[in-house]
Amino acid sequence: MRLTSKGRYAVRAMLDLTFHSNGNPVRLQEISTRQSISLHYLEQLFRKLRTGKVVKSVRGPGGGYVLARSQDEISVKDVLDCVGENINPARDILGIPSSGIEIMKDESGNEINAIVDTKEFNLTKSYFENLGTIMQDYLATTTLGDLARKSAGISATASSEATSASKESLIRQNIGEMNQ
């Protein structure tokens, strides 16, 4: 379960586009300069974002990129999906024994119980599948517009104080205890 730089950079670039567009195209060079992200890397990301229909390209003088839909219709999940980011914590839980474990074989050489199927494994798998569902719902219900509106009320000092004083999210209140 890891959000890579690809996903983080894509969300940052989309927020930059949201803040600086005002209906006009924004050049990738400008985003690159403001966000300190390689222009070549941004070109790769925006190719995927354009294919995913979250941005449109405008050709010619004064060209660049604009949002393909309203900022309230583009979720963080949409952006992450476009660039191929998969942060599902249960995606690798297959029940295959870890390396270093000798798998028993029958007389003909066939593996016996090559899949782990214990109550502990099933409980763990179910837990992380539920966590994945919660994460996907959170990403799907947070839009670029939500983040843009939230940024209007956050100053740099308030942001650093909030992260050091309490571990609350600046976007949403703490979810609290979740039971399965």
Image: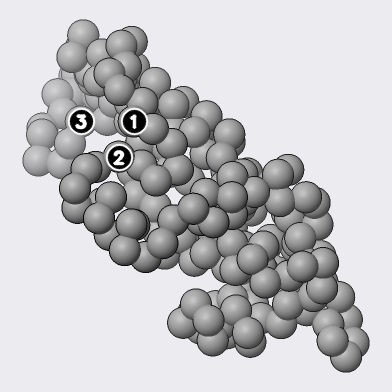
Marks 1,2: beta carbons within 8 A: yes
Let me know if residue 110 appears in the view.
no
> Of residues 40 and 120, which is closer to you in this image?
40
Q: Residue 120 lies in what quarter of the image?
A: top left
C-alpha distance separating marks 3 and 1 = 36 Å
Instruction: Tell me the residue at 60%/68% (across/down).
Output: 16
Task: Report which residue position mark 2 lands on.
Answer: 168
Helix, strand or loop for disc 3: loop
Place of residue 147 in the rendered image (x, y in percent of width and height, measured from the top left):
55, 50
Q: CA distance from mark 1 to mark 2?
A: 6 Å
Query: Residue under circle 3?
Result: 97
**Quadrant of the rendered image containing residue 33:** bottom right
Question: Residue 174, which numbered label?
Answer: 1
Residue at the spot x=10%, y=34% of the render?
A: 101
Residue 180 x, y percent position in the rendering: 33, 10
Q: Nearer the viewer, mark 2 or mark 3?
A: 2
Which residue is the extreme one toward the bottom?
A: 61
**Image vertical order of residue 175 relative to residue 117, above or below:** below
